[in-house]
Image (spheres, rainbow, N blue to C red):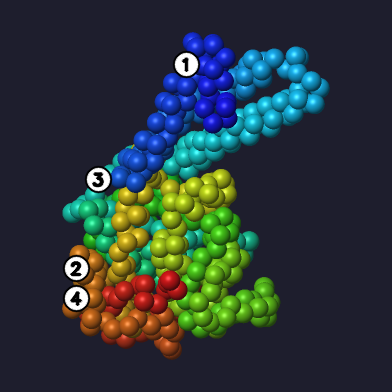
C-alpha cells in the first residue's frame, strides 16, 4: 500500500493524522510532476527555464531528499503497524522482505532523481556560466559554432570549423553559413581592437588566416583589457564584419572530445555520400567509412568530420555541417532525458560557451522550432569566393539571400530553386587556394577558385544531402 499510495497504511490502521498528511504530500508531489509534464508539452521554453535555474534545482533536490526520508519512514511505520512480532516466523520473514524490497525500490527512484537534478545543476553552473544576455537582432538569434583542436603538433588553439547559424526567433527557420579556415584578409568592424591593429584586414603574413584570428588575439590579450576571452571576441568581430550579422552567443566545441558526445546520445545517422578513409599519423589508411546511410558512433563520426586524406578542407566543412544538422534533427527530448548524465558529462568536457543559464529556455525553444524546419545553407568556398583575395560583398549578398530564403517556404524560394541539388564535392577541384593537407592552415598562393566579383547564388537546402532520415 505504501508503495502505491504513501500514507494509506497509516490511514487504514487508524493513524489518520500521519496518513492524511502523507497522502497530501504525495498528491502534491505527483501534481507538480504532472504539471511540469504538461508545461513541457505546451511550452518547453518555460519548462527549461524553470529546470535550468540552479536555485530551483537545488530546492527540488532538497524536496526529493526529504521525500525519500519520509517515504522510508512510512514503510518502516507500515511494517510496525502490521505487528510483525505477532506473526509466524515465515509470515514475518515474508513481510520484512517485502517491506525492504518495496522501500529500496521507492527510495532508490527518488534518490536517483535527486542525483540527476544534482548533475544537471552542477553541469549547468559550469557550462552555462555566462552572465550577459543579448536580444535578437531584427528578430533573429545568431549563434557562432566553433570546432577547435589544440593538437600536439599545433601552436595554440585554432578553430578549424566556423559556422554561423542565424535563427528566426518566431518561426525557427534557420540559415547556416560556413567559413573556410584559410580565408585571407578578413576585415574587422571599425572601432574594434582588431581593426585598429589591422585597418586593411587581417594581413600579416602567411599565418594570418581566419582561423588564426583567435590565436593572434589570445597571444595579444594585453590589447583587450578586461576581456576574459579575447580570441572569441576577435573571431566574433571578424564574422560580424564578414556577414553583417551581430553574434549573440558562441559555442566552442573541442573536437578531440566530440566523440564522447556522439556516443552519449547513441550515435548519429548521416548519409555518407562517398567512402571516407580513416588514416593513421603516417597517412596510411586504417579503415573506411562506407558510403550510404550510416549510424556512426563517436569515433567514426569524428573521423567523418575530420578526414581529408582524399578530399579538401571544403569537403570536410560540408561533412561537418552534415553532422551538425543530423544531430539537430535526431536529438529529441526523450533521448536527452534517458541519457542525460552521459550527455552532461560529455558536455562539461568539450563545450565552452557564453550562453547564460537564464537563456537556456530560449535556446531550447529555438532548437525545437528549427528541428521542424528546413535549414538553408551557404558554404563560402571556391568557386563562390576566392579564399586568397575574397570579394567580401559576395559574402554579404549571399548571407542576405540565404536569410530571405529561410523566411519563405524553401521549395517555393526562387533562390533555392536556382541553386538546385547541392554537391558536397563542389570545392574539391584544382585551384582551391587553401591548405588541404597540413593542419597549420598556412597560406597558399592559389587563387582559390572562380571569379570573386560575381555574386553566385549558393543557397541550398542542407537536409537534402546531409540527413539520412
Residue underneath mark 2: 408
Q: Position of residue 224 (x, y in %)?
A: 38, 45
Mark 2 and mark 3: Cα distance apart in space: 23 Å
**Depth order, front residue of 211/23:** 23
User: Front-most of 364 and 454?
Assistant: 364
User: Which residue is label 4 attached to?
Assistant: 412
Which quarter of the figure has residue 45? top left
Q: Residues within 10 Å of mark 2 (few under 14, many from 20)?
A: few
Report if residue 455 is visible in the image. yes
Quadrant for the N terminus in the image: top right
First along the sequence among labels 2 and 3 = 3
Marks 2 & 4, CB-CB < 8 Å contact: yes
- Number of marks in the image? 4
Earlier sequence position, callout 1 versus callout 4:
1
Where is residue 114 shown, x and y percent of the image?
Answer: 54, 32
Residue at 54% of width from left, 17% of height from top? 12
**Residue 281, relative to residue 274: is it above or below?**
above
In the rendered view, tell whether residue 212 sits above or below residue 219: below
Q: Nearer the viewer, mark 3 or mark 4?
A: 4
Q: Which mark is residue 21?
A: 1
Task: Identify the residue under disc 3.
Answer: 135
Query: Which residue lies at the image location 30% right of the left edge and 56% below the top edge?
Result: 369
The mark lying in front, picked from 1 and 3, is 1
Tag 1–tag 2 contact (CB < 8 Å): no
Q: Earlier in the sequence, mark 3 or mark 4?
A: 3
Which-is-in-front pick, marks 1 and 4? 1
Amino acid at each position: 500500500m505504501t508503495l502505491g499510495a504513501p500514507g494509506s497504511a497509516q490511514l487504514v490502521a487508524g493513524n489518520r493524522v500521519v496518513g492524511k498528511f502523507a497522502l497530501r504530500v504525495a498528491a502534491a508531489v505527483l501534481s507538480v510532476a504532472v504539471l511540469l509534464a504538461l508545461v513541457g508539452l505546451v511550452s518547453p521554453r518555460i519548462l527549461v527555464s524553470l529546470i535550468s535555474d540552479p536555485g530551483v534545482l537545488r530546492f527540488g533536490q532538497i524536496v526529493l531528499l526529504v521525500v525519500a526520508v519520509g517515504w522510508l519512514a512510512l514503510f518502516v511505520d507500515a511494517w510496525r503497524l502490521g505487528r510483525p512480532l505477532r506473526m509466524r516466523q515465515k509470515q514475518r520473514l515474508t513481510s520484512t522482505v517485502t517491506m525492504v524490497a518495496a522501500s529500496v525500490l521507492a527510495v532508490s527512484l527518488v534518490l536517483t532523481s535527486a542525483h540527476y537534478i544534482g548533475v544537471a545543476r552542477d553541469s549547468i553552473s559550469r557550462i552555462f556560466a555566462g552572465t550577459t544576455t543579448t536580444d535578437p537582432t531584427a528578430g533573429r538569434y545568431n549563434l557562432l559554432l566553433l570546432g577547435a583542436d589544440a593538437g600536439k603538433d599545433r601552436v595554440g588553439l585554432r578553430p578549424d570549423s566556423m559556422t554561423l547559424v542565424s535563427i528566426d526567433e518566431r518561426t525557427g527557420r534557420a540559415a547556416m553559413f560556413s567559413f573556410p579556415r584559410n580565408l585571407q584578409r578578413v576585415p574587422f568592424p571599425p572601432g574594434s581592437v582588431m581593426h585598429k591593429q589591422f585597418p586593411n584586414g587581417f594581413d600579416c603574413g602567411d599565418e594570418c588566416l581566419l582561423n588564426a584570428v583567435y590565436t593572434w588575439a589570445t597571444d595579444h590579450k594585453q590589447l583587450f583589457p578586461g576581456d576574459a576571452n579575447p580570441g572569441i571576441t576577435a573571431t566574433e568581430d571578424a564574422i560580424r564584419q564578414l556577414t553583417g550579422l551581430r553574434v549573440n552567443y558562441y559555442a566552442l566545441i573541442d573536437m578531440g572530445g566530440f566523440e564522447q558526445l556522439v556516443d552519449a546520445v547513441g550515435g548519429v545517422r548521416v548519409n555518407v555520400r562517398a567512402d571516407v578513409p580513416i588514416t593513421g599519423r603516417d597517412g596510411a589508411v586504417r579503415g573506411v567509412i562506407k558510403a550510404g546511410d550510416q549510424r556512426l558512433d563517436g569515433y567514426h563520426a569524428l573521423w567523418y568530420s575530420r578526414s581529408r586524406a582524399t578530399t579538401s578542407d571544403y569537403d570536410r566543412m560540408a561533412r561537418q555541417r552534415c553532422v551538425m544538422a543530423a544531430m539537430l534533427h535526431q536529438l529529441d527530448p526523450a533521448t536527452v532525458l534517458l541519457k542525460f548524465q552521459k550527455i552532461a558529462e560529455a558536455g562539461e568536457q568539450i563545450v565552452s560557451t557564453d550562453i547564460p543559464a537564464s537563456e537556456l529556455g530560449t535556446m531550447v525553444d529555438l532548437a525545437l522550432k528549427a528541428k521542424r524546419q528546413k535549414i538553408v545553407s551557404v558554404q563560402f568556398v571556391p568557386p563562390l569566393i576566392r579564399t586568397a583575395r575574397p570579394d567580401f560583398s559576395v559574402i554579404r549578398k549571399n548571407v542576405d539571400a540565404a536569410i530571405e530564403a529561410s523566411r519563405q517556404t524553401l521549395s517555393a524560394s526562387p533562390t533555392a530553386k536556382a541553386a538546385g541539388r547541392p554537391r558536397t564535392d563542389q570545392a574539391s577541384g584544382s585551384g582551391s587556394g587553401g591548405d588541404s593537407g597540413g593542419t597549420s592552415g598556412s597560406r597558399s598562393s592559389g587563387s582559390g577558385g572562380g571569379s570573386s566579383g560575381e555574386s553566385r547564388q549558393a543557397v541550398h537546402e542542407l537536409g537534402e544531402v546531409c540527413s539520412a532520415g
